[in-house]
Image (cartoon, helix red, strand yellow):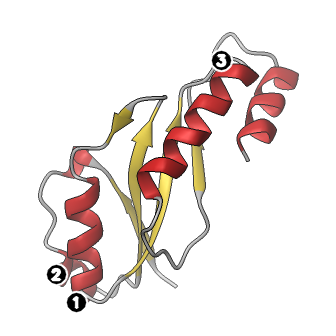
C-alpha cells in the first residue's frame, strides 16, 4: 500500500487529489505532548475518510520520563477515542537528544 503522513504543517490537503495520485492510506497526526491536539486533525480525518482513504493516527511524543509518557498516552487515546481507524496507533519519537539508549527504549516501551 502507498501511504503518507500528514499534520498541520501541510495546511489544507485535497484528499481527493491525494487519492487520484495513487495514495491509499494516510496517517494523521492527532496529538503531541500531554495537551496539544493538531488543529487540522479532525478536518484531516473527516476529509480523508470522505475521499475513501484508509486512515491511521499518530502521536508526536515529547516525554522525557516514564511518568510523562503515561500522560501523553492517555492524551493520545482520549483524542482518538470513538474514531475508526484501519491502522495501528503510531508513536513518532524524534526528540531523543540527551537521552541514553536505555532511556529511549524505556520511554518508547512504556508508551507502546
Crowd class of label 3 (few under 14; some 14 to 19; many from 20; radius 10 Å): some
Tell me if 102 is positioned left or right of 16 in this view. right
Q: Is residue 80 above or below residue 103?
A: below
CA separation, marks 2 and 3? 38 Å
Crowd class of label 1 (few under 14; some 14 to 19; many from 20; radius 10 Å): few
Residue to which mark 1 is pinned: 20
Q: Is residue 87 visible?
A: yes
Residue to which mark 2 is pinned: 17
Counting from the top left corner in percent of width and height, residue 35 is at 40, 30
Helix, strand, or loop for circle 3? loop
Q: Is residue 4 above or below residue 110?
A: below
Tell whether label 1 touches label 2 (CB within 8 Å): yes
Tell me if 31 is positioned left or right of 107 in this view. left
Counting from the top left corner in percent of width and height, residue 9 is at 24, 44
Q: Where on the picture, by quarter, is residue 98?
A: top right
Crowd class of label 2 (few under 14; some 14 to 19; many from 20; radius 10 Å): few
Residue to which mark 3 is pinned: 64
Amino acid at each position: 500500500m502507498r501511504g503518507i503522513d500528514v499534520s498541520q504543517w501541510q495546511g489544507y490537503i485535497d484528499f481527493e487529489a491525494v487519492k487520484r495520485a495513487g495514495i491509499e492510506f494516510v496517517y494523521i497526526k492527532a496529538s503531541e505532548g500531554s495537551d496539544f491536539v493538531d488543529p487540522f486533525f479532525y478536518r484531516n480525518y473527516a476529509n480523508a475518510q470522505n475521499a475513501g482513504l484508509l486512515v491511521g493516527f499518530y502521536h508526536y511524543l515529547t516525554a522525557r520520563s516514564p511518568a510523562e509518557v503515561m500522560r501523553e498516552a492517555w492524551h493520545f487515546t482520549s483524542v482518538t477515542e470513538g474514531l475508526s481507524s484501519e491502522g495501528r496507533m503510531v508513536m513518532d519519537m524524534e526528540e531523543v537528544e540527551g537521552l541514553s539508549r536505555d532511556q529511549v527504549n524505556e520511554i518508547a516501551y512504556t508508551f507502546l
